[in-house]
Every structure is written in C-alpha cells, then in structure tokens.
Image: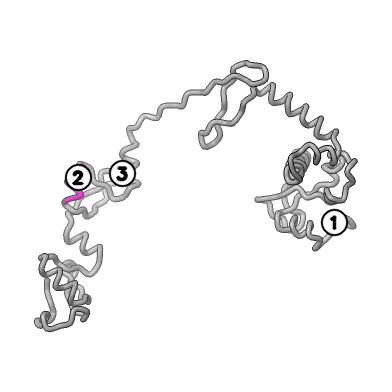
Amino acid sequence: MQLLIDDLENRKYNELVPLKCERCGKEFWKITKEVRSAMKRNRLNYCSRRCSREGKGKLVSCAFCKKDIYKRPCDIRKSANTYCSLSCAAKNNNKNKKICPKKPIVRACTECGKDFIRGRNEKGLLSRKFKCDPCSIVKEIKYNQGFNDCTKAELFNRRKNWQSARSTIQKWARKILFDNSSDKECIICGYSLHVDACHIRGVADFPGDTLISVINHINNLVPMCKNHHTAYDDGYFSLLNS
C-alpha cells in the first residue's frame, strides 16, 4: 500500500486519505477507517473491482470460448474448468448431454372409452383433454347447435351468474367473427395485437326472447381493440348510424 501521506494515525476515522492503486497506479480516496483496516490485514488497495480482480487473480482462459479472464486462486481450485460467464458454463456442460424424448401419455376417453394420446403444447406441457378427437368434435357440434338455438333468457337462467353467461356470449362472438372474417384489426385505429369482438347493437339492448344466433350474427360484430371497445360500450361514439 502506497500512502501519499505519512501522518495516518493523526487523522480522524472519517477523514479522506489519498491512496494509489497497486494495479493501475491511479490516485483515489478512502476514509481513514478503511485504510487502517486494510493495513492490519495486510491487504492491498485497488481503485475498482476490476483492478482488484486483476491484481489478486490469475490469468486463465475460458474452457468454452477461450477468452482470457482473471480468476481468484480459490475459484480455480474449486473446479477443473473455468468459465467467463454462466452462459459459457451452461453451453459447455450441456454440449454432450443426451436429451431423452418425452414418452407419449395414453389415456382413455371419457365418452367412448378408447385410448388416445394426449398432445403437448409449444412449451411441452400436456394438454387438458379428456376426450378423443372424434368425441370432442361431436360434442362441439352438439354444443354449438344447442347454444345457437337457445334464447338470451334461457342462457342467463342456465348459467350460475351474469358474468358466466356474458363471457359465453363474448367467447362465441369472437369465434364467429374471426372464423368468418379475415379482418382482425380494430376498425377505428388499426391495432391488431389484442382485438375483441364488439357487438354493434349491445347484448343488453336485445330482449330476452332473442336467439343467441341473432345476437352473435356476423353482421352485428366488428373487430375493435380493448380501448375503443370500452369507449364504445360507455357511449363515447356510435356505429349504428354509420
């Protein structure tokens, strides 16, 4: 440690002391308390963590990318290979790792009892299917027929609460709109990431004996972003006269 002053003991504990870095020779300042502690432990002073790492460490090369890095002797003794980052360590450790393919999961259909293979999504998670594809298609067709033939009052009486019935209407409105129309942008601003199916004539404006197929008719649906959908429902603008 190279002090630029000699009267260290006469200084206060929080007084700044000028020092010189043992690695790069740059002058910096530390309080007297830290300087005295470093002198008792016989530790060198450095102006930055980089100089401390380079001064105390040893120059080695990364086992994966061959980049020159400084490592402490204690870190070198811990393992045979040294890496410059966690990314290089993971790439080198997984280089010869054998990835076993996931076995298909077979389960019995709850409708017909036949075995079918459960599929996986993009993340590799199992789908939550309890029926085979033919049974699922038949159930969807029957559900669509029963849903389109029921009235608004019957649907709201069948559901547990108002929100459940309203969500069902909105769900099938999106399906009808996006299956029968290629336009998936907001008609007001052109936003296309998150688009809702907006009813031109609101669901609340229809009487209770109106069929759901009439409420969710393609001519009563337009694509609209969430902001303009909320503004339209609150009555800030209208599409009935346009």
- Residue type beneath disc 1: Leu
Give the main secondary structure, helix, strand or loop, of the magenta stretch: helix
The crowd level at tag 3 (other Cα within 10 Å; few <14, some 14-19, many 20+) is some
Marks 1 and 3: in contact by CB < 8 Å? no
**Which residue matches tag 1?**
239
* Boundaries of the magenta span: 74-79
Give left or right: position of 130 versus 143: left
**Distance in Å between CA atoms under marks 2 and 3:** 14 Å
Under circle 3, the secondary element is: helix
The front one of 129 and 221 is 129
Q: Nearer the viewer, mark 3 or mark 1?
A: 1
Q: Earlier in the sequence, mark 3 or mark 1?
A: 3
- Separation of disc 1 and disc 2 at Cα? 71 Å
Residue at which label 3 appears: 89
User: In the figure, residue 48 lies in which quadrant?
Assistant: bottom left
Look at the image and say whether residue 75 sits in the magenta stretch.
yes
Question: Whole-percent x and y of residue 213?
Answer: 85, 38
State left or right for residue 115 relative to residue 100: right
* Label ID, residue 78: 2
User: Helix, strand, or loop for circle 2?
Assistant: helix
Q: Of marks 1 and 2, which one's residue comes earlier in the chain?
A: 2
Question: Please, which colouring scheme is shown?
Answer: one colour
Q: Can you say whether 165 is above or below 103 in the image?
A: below
Residue displayed at 22% across by 64% down? 51
Residue found at x 80% / y 41%: 156
Q: Is residue 33 above or below residue 152?
A: below
